[in-house]
């Protein structure tokens, strides 16, 4: 190979494999001074080298290419028979001689230089939000240790831009709306998995009152995380049922009647000027089946498990505008997760909710429908008990290894009990 000429395909492959192996060594990381060798077997470069069907001319061309490389680089050929020197075994370079010549020939920079250059991509987004800062600190720490970051720089920039937007979002917004606002393409963040990568960061560095074990699928868990920031795949609705009136800013008045369920799209909630509730009790219900079944005379609202931003704000508005409401109740699954949802509801709304239909009597009455607790159930129950929460029911659950879904109660009892 003539000086100044670019390496051919075989040479480039060999040099690349050698550099990949070298960057995994202690010599590259400057952790050792012992004499290490980088070796690449001939089969890695030319898989058909020993094949009976390979073209002899191709073998000769390959061998000439390797001998040319040996002449102008630290790469050395090891032969199967040292005396004959006619069949290749492998190629080697002392690790101490890899830099800078092999990098120059391969037209490649050491990873440490590439990683150092990537740090600037992250630091542009520093100081915008705590979760973003925590992510950036973690990625720059990896890069300074000469390890790969989670994402390629261009992808990382898209992800941080999306994360920054979500963390500062204050109104209901859909996935595709974020995508077109940030990237001019409604499908960009899903097509390039930007949203799923953003959720990965939120899972790692965010703090939520729920975990993946609380949902039937990772997709539902991701949706719940994004809902904490009022970000949704499709428009969501707040479902409620009871006597009252809703006054919209445009003059529309929605009259409510118990037994006639109503759903208002989440992005219309901000248009509500006033909610009047003609009942002394508000009852939130965890699951849709039970919401559709139970009739209590209370003003009822479907919570959909861990409540999202829209339902939280709706409940706060009712609380502010209806001080005469004397009871705030929650009906959920008779399991540790159901009580965790109740505690989450109390903490996020600031309203003093109490449990409804969630006591040991129903565990006893419908014992044949109960299921055993799993590890996540026990962990949640024990954490709540340590905090002094719902001690009677949770202690019974742990002692008898039982939990019960609320749907059997709402079906059998209809009204569960008088409010």
Image: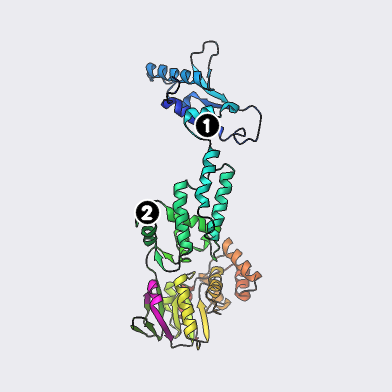
- In space, the residues marked 1 and 2 are separated at their CA atoms by 35 Å
- Residue drawn at (38%, 71%) of the image: 267
**Disc 2 on helix, strand or loop?**
helix
Q: Residues within 10 Å of mark 2 (few under 14, many from 20)?
A: some
Q: In the figure, 22 relative to 89: above or below? A: below
Q: Is residue 416 visible?
A: no
Q: Which quadrant holds the N terminus?
A: top left
Region of the chain picked out in magenta, as a range: 263-277
Residue placed under numbered mark 2 in the picture: 188
Viewer-proximal residue, 351 or 132?
132
Outermost residue on the top side: it is 83
Q: Main secondary structure of the magenta part?
A: strand
Q: Quadrant of residue 81?
A: top right
The residue beneath circle 1 is 19
Mark 1 secondary-structure assignment: helix
Residue at image position (63%, 72%) is 395
Closer to the camera, 367 or 248? 248
**Magenta stretch: residue 73 in it?**
no
* Above or below for 334 versus 185: below
Q: Dividing the picture into quarters, in which one does residue 301 lie?
A: bottom left
On screen, residue 102 versus residue 398, left or right, reads left
């Amino acid at each position: 190979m003539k000086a100044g000429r670019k390496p051919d395909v075989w040479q480039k492959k060999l040099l690349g494999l050698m550099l990949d192996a070298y960057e995994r060594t202690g010599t590259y990381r400057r952790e050792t001074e012992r004499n290490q060798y980088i070796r690449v077997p001939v089969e890695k470069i030319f898989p058909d080298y020993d094949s009976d069907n390979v073209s002899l001319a191709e073998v000769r061309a390959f061998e000439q290419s390797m001998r040319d490389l040996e002449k102008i680089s630290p790469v050395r050929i090891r032969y199967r028979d040292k005396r004959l020197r006619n069949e290749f075994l492998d190629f080697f370079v002392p690790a101490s001689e890899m830099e800078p010549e092999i990098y120059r020939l391969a037209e490649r920079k050491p990873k440490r230089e590439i990683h150092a250059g990537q740090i600037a991509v992250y630091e542009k987004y520093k100081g915008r939000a705590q979760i973003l800062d925590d992510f950036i600190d973690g990625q720059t720490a990896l890069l300074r240790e000469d390890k790969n970051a989670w994402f390629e720089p261009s992808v990382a920039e898209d992800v941080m831009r999306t994360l920054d937007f979500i963390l500062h979002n204050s109104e209901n917004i859909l996935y595709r709306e974020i995508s077109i606002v940030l990237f001019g393409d409604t499908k960009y963040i899903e097509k390039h998995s930007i949203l799923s990568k953003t959720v990965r960061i939120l899972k790692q560095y965010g703090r939520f009152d729920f975990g993946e074990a609380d949902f039937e699928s990772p997709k539902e868990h991701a949706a719940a995380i994004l809902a904490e920031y009022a970000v949704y795949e499709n428009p969501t609705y707040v479902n409620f049922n009871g006597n009252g009136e809703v006054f919209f800013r445009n003059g529309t008045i929605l009259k409510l009647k118990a037994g006639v369920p109503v759903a208002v799209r989440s992005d219309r909630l901000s248009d509500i000027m006033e909610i009047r509730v003609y009942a002394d009790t508000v009852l939130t219900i965890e699951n849709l089946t039970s919401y559709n079944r139970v009739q209590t005379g209370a003003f009822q609202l479907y919570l959909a498990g861990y409540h999202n931003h829209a339902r939280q704000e709706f409940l706060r508005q009712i609380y502010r505008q209806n001080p005469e409401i004397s009871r705030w109740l929650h009906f959920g699954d008779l399991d540790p997760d159901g009580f965790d949802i109740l505690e989450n509801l109390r903490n996020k709304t600031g309203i003093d909710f109490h449990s409804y239909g969630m006591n040991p009597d129903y565990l006893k009455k419908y014992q044949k429908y109960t299921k055993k607790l799993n590890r996540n159930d026990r962990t949640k129950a024990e954490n709540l008990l340590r905090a002094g929460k719902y001690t009677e029911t949770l202690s019974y659950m742990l002692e008898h290894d039982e939990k019960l879904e609320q749907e059997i109660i709402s079906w059998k009892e209809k009204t569960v009990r008088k409010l």
